[in-house]
Image (cartoon, grey):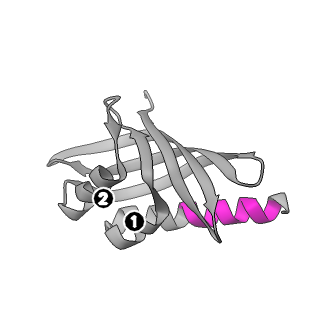
Amino acid sequence: MDLEVLMGEIEQYEQRLLAAQLASDVGALDGLIADELVFVDLAGQLATKAMDLESHRAGLLKLTRSELLGREVRFVGVGAAATISLVAMSGSFGGAEFEGQFRYTRVWEKRGEGWVIVAGHISAVAS
């Protein structure tokens, strides 16, 4: 498959993910995240898909702003890609407000006609 086509697909899926996160659209997030997701949060703790979906469903995580500042995409063959994104974000988690720049690493896997996130990590960027 053409690299430009793959790049376009990944960008489209990243945009879908952003929209779903901002809206806390659990149905959309469910389709974008693999059941076996492993995610490392800001505290270095492991989170699962169920935990991520519940944080949106329960209103624990509320994003009010998420602006992409930069992204790199690396492909591993035609079936997997890693995205490294720099994002300016604000919102609240558990009632505590946050704002800052964060770097996300996500591993996307091609499944059928679409892509799902199988692993991810977030780090706060020091100012």
Type of amino acid at the residue the image marks with label 2: Leu
* SS for callout 2: helix
Q: Position of residue 70 (x, y in %)?
A: 61, 47
For this orientation, the residue located farthest to the right is 2
Type of amino acid at the residue the image marks with label 1: Asp
Q: Position of residue 92 (x, y in %)?
A: 23, 50
Q: Quadrant of the N terminus?
A: bottom right
62 within the magenta span: no
For this orientation, the residue located farthest to the left is 95
Q: Mark 2 vs mark 1: which is more N-terminal?
A: 1
What residue is shown at x 61% (from left), y 54% (from top)?
Answer: 109
Q: Position of residue 66 (x, y in %)?
A: 42, 55
Picture disc at residue 53: 2
Picture disc at residue 30: 1
Q: Position of residue 56 (x, y in %)?
A: 26, 60
Main secondary structure along the magenta-highlighted residues:
helix
Q: Quadrant of the C terminus?
A: top left
8 within the magenta span: yes
When the figure is inspected, residue 93 is found, relative to residue 18, above or below; the finding is above
Dividing the picture into quadrants, the one containing residue 110 is: bottom right
Q: How far is mark 2 from mark 1, CA to CA?
A: 7 Å
Q: Which residues are magenta?
A: 4-14
- In this orientation, does residue 25 appear? no
Marks 2 & 1, CB-CB < 8 Å contact: yes
- In this orientation, does residue 52 appear? yes
